[in-house]
Amino acid sequence: MKSLVVLHASQLITLAGPKRPRVGAEMSELAIIRDGGMLIREGKIEILGSSEEVAKNARDVEIIDADGRVVLPGFVDAHTHLIFAGNRLDDFERRARGETYEQIAKAGGGIWSTVEKTRAASSEELFNQAQTHAEWFLRCGTTTIEAKSGYGLTVEDELKILRVMQRLNEEKPLEIVPTFLGAHAVPRELDVNEYIDLLIDEMLPRMSKEKLAEFCDVFCEHGYFTIEQSRGILTAARQLGLGLRIHADQLSNSGAAQLAAELKATTADHLEKTDERGIAAMKSAGVQPVLLPGSVYALGSTAYPHAREMLDAGLAVVLATDFNPGSSPTPSMPMILSIACTRMKMSPAEAITASTINAAYSLNRGGKIGSLERGKLANFSIFDCEDYRELAYWFGIPQTHSVYVKGERVHR
Ligand code: NIG
Ligand code: FE
């Protein structure tokens, strides 16, 4: 592996700081080095500092001149539904005509329509589609994603999806952290209790035995899985050693944030309808909220989660795309930064902390990625701007100049 040095970043956004997720005022501290540089050996960061200091150590190395651009750790996207077949263009058009997500699902669109297509697709087809989408993430400056299964809903189809993730993770530069979301919906051919038995007795043990998932997630929502049912599934998952994440309070406040707290889940995700009781429960249990404003935006809703209350309560907020064909067809973290700042009143610095170091901790990888610090992986992006706030400010225009994973250029 070759060594390289990056010089002359207008702002080297390091996010160096305490070795834990950042809260409160810490979320505004990006630890910026002006005219910064870093030396990379064996895919890891060895030296960071001013370009002048770093250049002194740069013998026999490839030089990358950032030429006055911003350099940022690779974004960490802690909530995606990467693997699916087809798209949901018809749903999209129906929503544009005024139908709701729930109405469309009842009328034959929604998650179920993607399940049918995903079941019919071969592993190769799923791999090819996911590979294209994995490249979209890199193109937007994201170098690690969490990815959920959940469009198979049979033992074999869920395994097929998780194996596609595993292969993609092994063969391509985008790092993928796998989550088993068998409890994404109840398959049409079973009643809910039969399906939960299948999940607990067959699916979870298979995933765990083949080490295909690090986390288990449940869509806890009316018409999907109740609090009781979610508790049962997640408790079984925890006994197998999986970390827990929950799709919580997205469309209605069912107390799922409190369930996340009770189970000491790593994250509670969505939280559009969560109130102050849910926020207090997450705070006392150390649950990280994962906010997904892309799905609120794309569903044409204005019910954004109460990010400011969560930040003020001292929660270690995470931002993610929720990339999926139905409610959030975007792989773009810069787009999420824009929505977070304009709709949820997060500052650009808070939004960047939420989409890098805090996201890394929510995937148990805070010691390895999410900031640019000595010993961490050299996963970073160079953006065509001088000030990090431009990432959230200009929207709808790609500003990515180049992207690196373990010191290797993976985009442009
Ligand atoms: O996170 N809420 C459930 N799951 C996805 C949507 C999945 C779909 O519509 O296909 C979400 O928004
Ligand atoms: Fe989701």
Image (tube, rainbow, N blue to C red):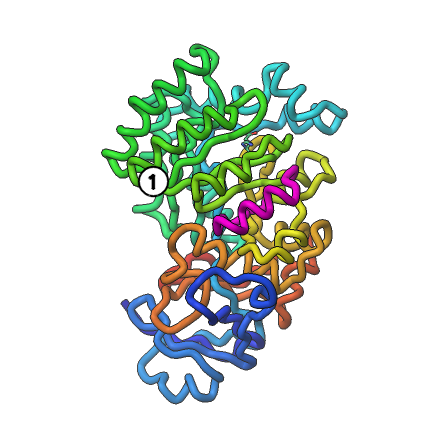
* Image x and y of residue 340, in percent: 66, 52
Which residue is pictured at 59% across the width and 27% down the height?
88
- Secondary structure type for disc 1: loop
The yes-or-no answer for disc 1 within 8 Å of ligand 2 is no
- Identify residue type, mark 1: Leu
Q: Quadrant of the N terminus?
A: bottom left
Instruction: Please give left or right for residue 262 compared with residue 215 in the image.
Output: right
Of 218 and 155, nearer the camera is 218
Of 150 and 55, nearer the camera is 150
Tally of numbered tags: 1
Which residue is pictured at 46% across the width and 28% down the height?
230
Q: Is residue 352 above or below residue 222?
A: below
Magenta span contains residue 29: no
Magenta-colored span: 272-291
Instruction: Please give left or right for residue 91 compared with residue 38 in the image.
Output: right
Q: Is residue 219 visible?
A: yes
Which residue is pictured at 27% across the width and 29% down the height?
205
Of 59 and 293, nearer the camera is 293
Label 1, residues with CA under 10 Å away: few <14, some 14-19, many ≥20: many
The quarter of the picture where residue 386 lies is bottom right
Instruction: Please give left or right for residue 407 compared with residue 257 in the image.
Output: left
Magenta span contains residue 281: yes
Of 195 and 59, nearer the camera is 195
Which residue is pictured at 40% across the width and 28% down the height?
233
* Image x and y of residue 142, in percent: 49, 54
User: Label 1 belongs to which residue?
Assistant: 242
